[in-house]
Each structure stands twice: as structure tokens, then as C-alpha cells.
Image (spheres, rainbow, N blue to C red):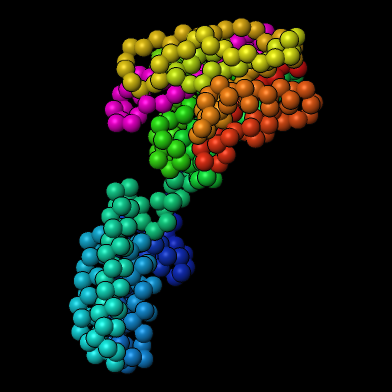
Amino acid sequence: MATDVSVLARRRPSTLARRFRAYTLAPGVRRDRIAFGVALVVAVAFILAILSWPGRFPTVAMTPLILLSGLYLPIRRLVALYAVITVGLCVAVPRLPFTTATRVVVMSAVIALMVMMVIVASSRTRVGATGFHGENLFVELRDRIAQSARLPGLPQGWTAESAVLSANGEGFSGDFMVADRTHGGRHLEVTLVDVSGKGREAGTRSLLLSGALGALLGALPPSAFLDAANSYLVRQGWEEGFATAVHVDINLDTGAYSVGNAGHPAAVRYSAGAGTWSLLEAGRGPVLGIMNGVHFPRASGVLAMGDALMIYSDGIIESRGHDLTEGTDRMLGAASDAMVRHGASLTEAVLGSARSGESDDRAVFVIVRR
């Protein structure tokens, strides 16, 4: 009789460099103590150098130490280090061969820099990140939003395009989209959400909602998707936590579709027979996150060969000095021209029609049955 045995072996670093790296760079209290000790030694060395060579060793040489320690030291050790630097400079700066005004400016600038770094360190402590790990975390989350918005492969006879652009080219957008093939791959479900605010103001809410709504796709019947999304948003209790959303479910075998709308601009459908776009005004409900127990009706229909369905955010049709009707007509005109010109990108045409330009978040999704 044979028995498979898995053994998890832990090896100690085999070289001196690896042992040093494992000892000094491992996260935790040990690394903080070592970093604090090194920074303290360097600070004392700088102060002694200023005292030994007044006027020759520049006080500005202390700046990199202040900046790096503000990024990597925990707040308590950082305050202790800055206290040592302040005391040392109070002793050393009066000996500099400068005027009193210059010495005051030097001390004020160093103290102001230390205060700013304490504020930065305090904000990083709130999220438990040191160094540049906080930025890396947000970059990873932003990339996950972009990943969830990627359209899955579609069967022959269907083409789809999508785009999400943030206001003023910022890294985060108040608009986001989640798409997935559901029901064994026979359906395509897409939801486009516009949270309150724009850019960085709405970035954190977008990060949280995109994961939650992505988990709901395919886990619930399409008729219950917006109901569940609304209940989730109400439970968050955000002061400005409302959002508009539109959810589309398309049967890729038959072309049957249904659209649910929560305070979002109306979806539009292109009829190849008539050669026109029409607004789907039915199936509209209130915005998400305002009240619980709300039901969202849905509009339904069937996409024939050559028909298209498009959803978009308000950044496409809103602009100062123009009403929504004018913005909608402008968008549909651009979309009609793109449908006539074979090979033209519908999303590029629609995005190009937005009068708001880069001052607002913009998103669009369009699917065409060929």
C-alpha cells in the first residue's frame, strides 16, 4: 500500500546576504526598530557635522532623512526622531554664520517639513500602509475595476464595445462597468454604475461597489439584480452613498433582452429596419441607496439582425448651458452616423459627441447583433 505524504519544509537563508535581508526587511516591529535606529544614528551624525563645520555642512542635507523617515517609520518612532532632530537643530542652527532672519527661516522650513510628514504618516497609519505600499494598493484595486469592465468573448453574430473614461484623466472614475457571461454562457449581463461624485471623490465608493455588484451578476435572476444592489447600498449608510445604475441582460441565443434602470439615463435601442435609435423609457426606478424595499421594473424586447442596444452615463449627454434633450439628440446623431459607416467605432463616436469633454466621467457600452 502506497501513501502520498506532503512535507512542508522551512529552510533558513543559506547565505549571509539572505540572512541579513530576512532579518532586516521582514515586516513587523523588528524592522521598525532597525529603521528607527539607523535613522537616529544618521540624524545625530548630521547634527554633529553641522556643529563641527558650521556653514560648510548644509542643513538641507537633513531633508532626505526627514522625508524617508516620514514614509517608513511608524508614527510614534517618527515623532521621537523628529524631537531629536528639533533639539539638535536648536543647538546647532544658532552657531551658523548667518543672520538671525536666515536662521529663523531655516528652522521654520525644517519644522514645517516635519509637521507635514507627521500628517502624511498619520494618514498612512489609518490604512496600515508604509512607504509606497498604499499607492500600490490603490493601483491594484483600480486595475481590478478595469479587469471587471473587460467584455468577455461573444459568440459569432455579436459584437460589443465599451469605454470608461475618468474626469480630467484621473486614475479613478465615478463611473464603472461590470460585465460577465452568465447562465452557462448563454447570457451577457452588463451593469453600468455612476456613483455620486467624480474622480477621486467617488473612487473609493466605486472600488467597493464594483466588487459587490460583480458578485451579484449571475448569482441572482436579472429581475432581482437592482433590488439586491439597492439593499446593499442602503446598508452601507454612506452620507452621499447614492448611485444610478442600469443593468442589461441579453440572451445571446435568441436576442431577447431586458433592461432595469435605477435613476440612470435611459438605454437606447437601434432598429435596423427603421434606421433610428429610440429611448427605452419603460422599466425605470429610483436611484440606488435612498430607501429599502424598492422594486425596479424592467423593459424587455428582442434584438433582430442589425439591431443594437446602448447604455451610457450622464457625462455623455450633460453639459453646462445645454439641456439633456439636446445632449441626447447629439449623442444619437453621432451613433447613427457610426452605424451607417461600417467599421466605424460606436464608442469613439459617442464619446466624441460629449460636450462635457474631459471635465466629467464618461462611460458607454454598445452591443450589436450582426
- Furthest-front residue in this view: 321
**x, y percentage for residue 202?**
41, 37
Q: Which residue appears at 70% of the width and 19% of the height?
A: 368
Provide the residue span drawn in magenta. Answer: 229-257
**Residue lying at 25% horizontally and 80% vertically, measured from the top left:** 104
- Relative image position of residue 178 (x, y in whole percent): 53, 27
Q: Is residue 261 visible?
A: yes
Q: Is residue 151 visible?
A: no
Q: Could you say which is closer to the camera, residue 122 or residue 94? A: 94
Instruction: Give the image quarter of residue 53.
Output: bottom left
Q: Nearer the viewer, residue 129 or 354?
A: 354
Question: 43 or 51, which is in the foreground?
Answer: 51
Observer-nearest of 70 and 37: 70
- Magenta stretch: residue 251 in it? yes
Q: Is residue 238 above or below residue 289?
A: below
Q: Residue furthest right?
A: 342
Q: Is residue 133 left or right of residue 100?
A: right
Measured as percent of width and height from the top left, residue 150 is found at: 60, 32
Residue 146, above or below 29 = above
Query: Magenta stretch containing residue 12, yes or no?
Result: no
> Residue at (33%, 12%) from the top-left corner?
293
Q: Exactly how many numbered labels are in the figure?
A: 0
- What residue is rendered at 43% in x and 47% in y? 137
| Residue 370 in picture, x, y percent from top left | 76, 17
The quadrant where residue 35 appears: bottom left
